[in-house]
Image (spheres, rainbow, N blue to C red):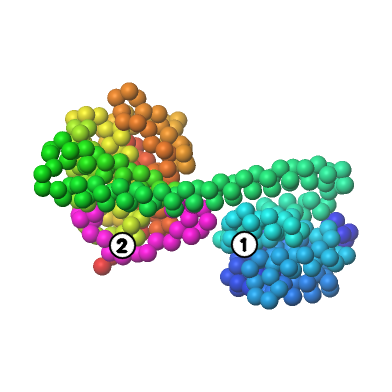
Amino acid sequence: MSKQEQTPKFLVVDDNAQNRALAQAALEDEGFDVVLATTGEEALEEVQRTAFDCVLLDINMPGMGGLAACRAIRALAQGQDLPIVVLTALRDVDTFDQALKAGADDFLTKPIHPTALVVRMKSALRLRRMSSELRDHYEIVRHQRDELMRLSLLQERLTAFVVHDLKNPVNVIDLHAQLLLRQKDISDSTKNSVHQIRDEVRALMRLILNLLDISKAEEGRLVPKAARIDVDELCTRVCDAVGVRASGANVALTCRLDAREVTADPDLFRRVLENLVDNALRYAPSGSEVAVTSRVAGEQFELCVSDTGRGVPEDLRAMIFERFYQVQATANEQRTSRGLGLAFCKLAIEAHGGQITLEPSSQGALFCVRIPHQRA
């Protein structure tokens, strides 16, 4: 068998046993030979005695770290053209730049997604087999890809800074609004204005937290902390929080709850309901109703929010859970959202092992959340 026909051999270097096992399973399922190492020193020894086709190298390891190991492999004659894909839990532009400077060909972030891992490792393997002319073209494309990656990481860092710096002043505004409401001589018109300020503050805080949690979910760091939730109390709190807004829009809020307890993350689940009610109020016509219902269906707890607005056109239904996607409001509806609420709901519910769907409805929109039900 010629070298071209031989089974590709991959070296997976990671001090975490679970990550090694996951990478090994994903690559062996594709028919590749996999050798495992747990430290940078082991990786260097393996490269010196075995001809590998590609290396997956974790950055953060005890002893010789991944970046030092990458530089050491590149210094070897057999490592100069060896494709190296680095793996890290640090999704930031500084780590990305350091990896490229150390000689890495590609950059993956944890948690490991088997499909993405296989695709990137195959791409690195194909690069090694390209002719020199094709490789020159690939290097141009790869440079452009690296620049896009850097811009993406810089944007994420900027978003994180902006979101963090916004939380404090927003909380201060809400605190002063609460202090105003405690004044004995406050007029009804002033009280109304303060309630509207608090309503907008809550909307802004919801947007800030949505941004944070969407970012966490994309990095695999959105982990629910389960607790028993009184659904009746939850619905009352959410409806009270938007009561002034609903009253101003002449929309009735109702809760019809058959299931009154659920096990979920209290903060995430509350914000899911807040986002769904907020979304329903945005499109509910004057004189209509926004209804919250709950039930247990088999092994699933189901929470639904419905309105009697114009609903979501059929051709847009597949896109409404995407980040920054907005359904344009009509002249009679409230302003459009920022396109983050439903995206957050989807990621938060999926983190619970459940799903959120837009159900068929004769009128308006009907959003249903389903998560595994834990019976008492």
Residue 47 visible from this viewpoint: yes
Residue 28 visible from this viewpoint: no
Amino acid type assigned to the residue bearing label 2 in the image = Thr
> Residue 50: which quarter of the image?
bottom right
The circle on residue 88 is: 1
Q: Residue sitting at 22 percent across and 41 percent down?
A: 194
Question: Relative to 62, does residue 81 appear above or below in the rendering?
Answer: above
Report the Cα–Cα distance between label 2 and label 1. Answer: 33 Å
Q: For the C terminus, which image quadrant?
A: bottom left
| 23 with respect to 33 (left or right) | left
214 falls in the magenta region: yes
Label 1: how many Cα within 10 Å (few below 14, some 14–19, many 20+):
many
Question: Relative to 186, does residue 327 appear above or below in the rendering?
Answer: above
Q: Earlier in the sequence, mark 2 or mark 1?
A: 1
Q: Nearer the viewer, mark 2 or mark 1?
A: 1
The residue tagged with tag 2: helix, strand or loop? strand
The circle on residue 263 is: 2
Amino acid type assigned to the residue bearing label 1 in the image = Thr
